[in-house]
């Protein structure tokens, strides 16, 4: 059996599976509910709980599960799976690296932790207009696709006011992207605006950030430079020079 309930008005849903789950459960309950949720919210966060009395999927249900995942993978913003079954936790962890959204697995007794993780902010982007066409972007924590969606309008407003601009990217506290969807959103932002960049500085502390500076320079044709984490003030002087 499957039940689907909204747990907030911000596109968060709880899916509970108990007993034997059949293809009828998927076709009559899960698929219509999630399709409607994605239509209503565009992107959703889902908490999947396998109750203690959950027994198994039928073959038809497994095929429906795969079909639904292929059709709607872009509609999931974050996924938490709660189960006491080791094979479910192992399978979810293994498949999680292939999914475009952040995925975490929790034991049944940590269902409340799963709910908190589903609702909390994992990272942030802070934008500051430094004047003279210079935008300071501070990336913090692990970014997911919803953060890009929230920041896009502010970024577009800055770019509308500045045909050409300079970027000061502070990545000292940046831990990467939560899932491939967030990375795709990041690449989309870069693709849409990189030709308008005159100069860019990246402040960070890892080798891949140095590589990102070189790639951005080649893509945009702009002057770019990498600064170590303790050289923030030097980077500000350079970006404005």
Image: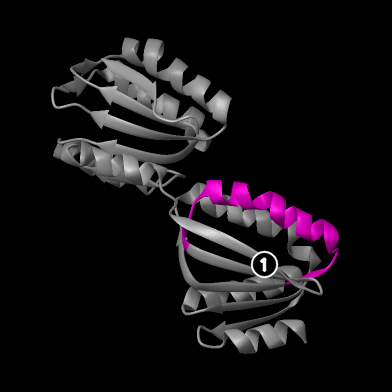
Q: Residue at x 33, y 25 (%)?
A: 15
Q: Position of residue 116 (x, y in %)?
A: 33, 44
Q: Position of residue 64 (x, y in %)?
A: 37, 20
Q: Is residue 239 above or below residue 81?
A: below
Q: Residue at x 50, y 83 (%)?
A: 229
Q: Is residue 51 above or below residue 226?
A: above
* Magenta stretch encompasses residue 165: yes
Specify the color scheme.
one colour
55 relative position to 130: left or right:
left
Crowdedness near tag 1: few (<14), some (14–19) or many (≥20) residues, C-alpha within 10 Å: some
161 relative position to 9: left or right:
right
The quarter of the image holding the N terminus is top left
Total labels drawn: 1
Q: Residue at x 74, y 63 (%)?
A: 194
Q: Is residue 181 above or below residue 211?
A: above
The quarter of the image holding the C terminus is bottom right
Q: Position of residue 138 (x, y in %)?
A: 57, 68
* Magenta stretch encompasses residue 86: no
Q: Position of residue 103 (x, y in %)?
A: 36, 45
Q: Which residue is mark 1?
A: 128
Q: Which span of residues is magenta-colored?
A: 141-166
Helix or strand or loop: what does disc 1 sit on?
Answer: strand
82 relative position to 155: left or right:
left
Asked which quadrant contains residue 231, the reply is: bottom right
Q: Is residue 39 above or below residue 179?
A: above
What secondary structure do most residues of the magenta stretch adopt? Answer: helix
């Amino acid at each position: 059996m499957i039940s689907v309930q909204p747990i907030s008005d911000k596109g968060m849903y709880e899916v509970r599976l108990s007993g034997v789950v059949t293809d009828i459960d998927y076709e009559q309950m899960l698929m219509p509910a999630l399709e409607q949720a994605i239509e209503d919210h565009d992107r959703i966060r889902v908490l999947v709980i396998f109750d203690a009395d959950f027994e198994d999927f039928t073959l038809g249900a497994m095929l429906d599960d795969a079909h639904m995942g292929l059709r709607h993978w872009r509609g999931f913003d974050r996924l938490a799976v709660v189960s006491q079954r080791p094979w479910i936790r192992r399978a979810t962890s293994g498949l999680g690296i292939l999914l475009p959204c952040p995925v975490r697995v929790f034991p049944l007794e940590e269902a409340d932790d799963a709910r908190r993780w589903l609702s909390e902010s994992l990272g942030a982007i802070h934008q500051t207009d430094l004047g003279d066409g210079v935008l300071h972007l501070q990336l913090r924590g692990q970014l997911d696709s919803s953060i890009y969606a929230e920041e896009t309008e502010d970024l577009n407003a800055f770019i509308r006011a500045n045909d050409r601009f300079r970027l000061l990217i502070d990545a000292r506290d940046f831990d990467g992207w939560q899932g491939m969807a967030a990375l795709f959103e990041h690449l989309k932002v870069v693709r849409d605006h990189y030709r308008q960049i005159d100069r860019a500085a990246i402040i960070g502390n890892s080798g891949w950030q140095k590589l990102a500076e070189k790639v951005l320079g080649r893509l945009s044709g702009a002057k770019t430079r990498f600064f170590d984490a303790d050289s923030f003030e030097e980077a500000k002087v350079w970006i404005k020079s």
